[in-house]
Image (cartoon, rainbow, N blue to C red):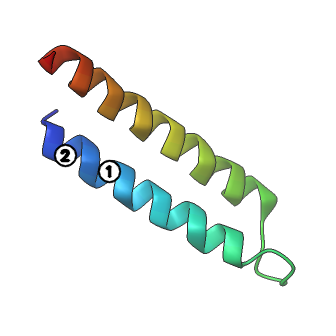
């Protein structure tokens, strides 16, 4: 995976987490979806960190 791909995936994951966060307190909020979005963000951040470590 290229550095740009990893950063792009991280940005998308952060966007999804924010969307789920804004649903809190509404009928559309699903805590499981929020947890999945957080986990996807964590994995995307790990991928970015691994790419940066490989470049150093």
Percent x, y of residue 52:
23, 26
Tell me what residue is drawn at x 58 percent, y 53 percent: 37
Circle 2 SS class: helix
Residue that carries the numbered disc 1 in the rendered image: 9
- 13 relative to 50 in the view: left or right: right
- 25 relative to 43 in the view: left or right: right
Q: For residue 34, which quarter of the picture?
A: bottom right
- 30 relative to 3 in the view: left or right: right
Q: For residue 51, which quarter of the picture?
A: top left
- 31 relative to 35 in the view: left or right: right
Q: Is residue 15 above or below residue 8?
A: below
Percent x, y of residue 28:
76, 80
Q: Is residue 27 above or below residue 32?
A: below
What mark, if any, has residue 17 been given in the picture? none
Circle 1 SS class: helix
Residue most extreme to the front: 56
Mark 1 residue crowding within 10 angstroms, few (<14) / some (14–19) / many (20+): some
Percent x, y of residue 1:
16, 32
Tell me what residue is drawn at x 19 percent, y 46 percent: 5
What mark, if any, has residue 5 been given in the picture? 2
**Tags 2 and 1 in contact by the CB under 8 Å rule?**
yes
Q: Is residue 20 above or below residue 33?
A: below
Mark 2 residue crowding within 10 angstroms, few (<14) / some (14–19) / many (20+): few
Q: Quarter of the image containing the C terminus?
A: top left
Front residue of 55 and 12: 55
């Amino acid at each position: 995976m290229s550095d740009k791909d990893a950063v792009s995936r991280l940005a998308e994951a952060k966007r999804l987490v924010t969307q789920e966060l804004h649903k809190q307190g509404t009928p559309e909020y699903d805590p499981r979806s929020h947890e999945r979005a957080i986990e996807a963000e964590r994995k995307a951040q790990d991928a970015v960190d691994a790419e940066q470590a490989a470049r150093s």
